[in-house]
Image: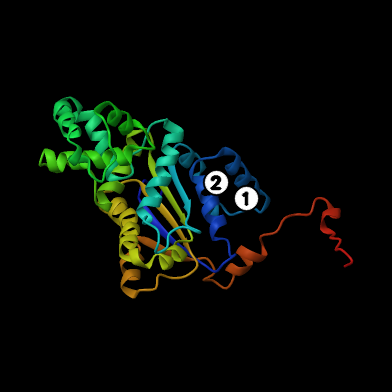
Amino acid sequence: HIRSGDGQGWWVQAEFGSGKSHLLSASTILALGGNVAWDSVEKKEKDSNTPKRESLVQFRDDICNIKLFPVSRSLVGVGGSSSTKGLIDYILETAAEYFEIVTGKPFPVYPEEHLADRFLERDLELYREELKKFLSIERNLEGLPKYSFERLLEALRDPEERQDAGAVLWKFYRNHLQTEPKIPVDQVDRLEHCVRRILSSGYDGVFIVLDEVSEYMEKDATRRYENEDTLLTISHTLAKERRLPVWCMCAAQTAIEAKQAASKIIAPDRLKQYELLRKERSYYEIVLKRTRRVKTVSYTHLTLPTN
């Protein structure tokens, strides 16, 4: 799917300890085109005389020429009824962290941050004097951080303060200018904007990897529908309807509980379900065969304390 540019999602399901996280990690490393990893795969296939039709190495040259942006996140220990974040926030925050590392540029995640970008890039000169008037009236900033004009401009450029400063801009646009600024607010807009910004930075596609998804979704029941829509957006709306190069792998220990939700998310044109242990031989191939050749015999002996 990556080689052909056809966006797709996968729901990888199996019990604890059966290799889901290992599969996700290995797939991510290979998708990013790491030569050391591909060399290892090539050697392993030669040693085991892997048939050509089953070989992974046939994809090597094509995959290594595709520049993918990774968004890899384990959802262990996050979420819950007390959390203010949904699945979309964890995905976008993870993308932002990596984007800022590789490009050195801020990456808007929340609507307030998108508004900060819009104002600095398009509206600063147009609304400079009006904003100064707005900030000079104390009641306009009730319940909001108190900024002078110059201090607000600093905050809009500071990754640590952009959300707070953006909240001031929201009130300025809505209450003072009586207008609704056009920025990505809903799930589809925010995720599509994220993907298109990454693509415009020189990447050929986005590879999203989410581990322990079912555990997270069960724990965050209050946002169940919102989180289901996030999965549907990345695997179907963006990948299939918008024809964007987006691939996602979700690992889960259990199936999605609600029948309606499962039929909405699990489908060949959305998240293809793949159960690692669905075949009788799979246990041998995934669990028992996962051994190493002994090189130092002394390492196999274990001395236990007498007490």
Among the 4 quarters of the image, the one containing residue 260 = bottom left
Residue 302: which disc?
Answer: none
Q: Is residue 57 left or right of residue 195?
A: right
Disc 2 residue type?
Answer: Val
What mark, if any, has residue 45 been given in the picture?
1
| Label 1 Cα neighbours within 10 Å, binned few <14 / some 14-19 / many ≥20 | some
Whether 125 is drawn above or below 287: the answer is above
Q: SS at mark 2?
A: helix
Comes first in the chain, label 2 or label 1: 1
Q: Nearer the viewer, residue 63 or 128?
A: 128
Q: Is residue 267 visible?
A: no
Residue toward you, 61 or 67: 67
The answer to whether the residues at label 2 and label 1 have Cβ atoms under 8 Å apart is: yes
Q: Is residue 13 above or below residue 53?
A: below
- Return the residue at label 2: 57
Q: Position of residue 299 (x, y in %)?
A: 82, 54
Q: Position of residue 234 (x, y in %)?
A: 33, 53
Residue shown at the point (15%, 30%) measured from the top left: 133
Placement of the C terminus among the 4 image quadrants: bottom right
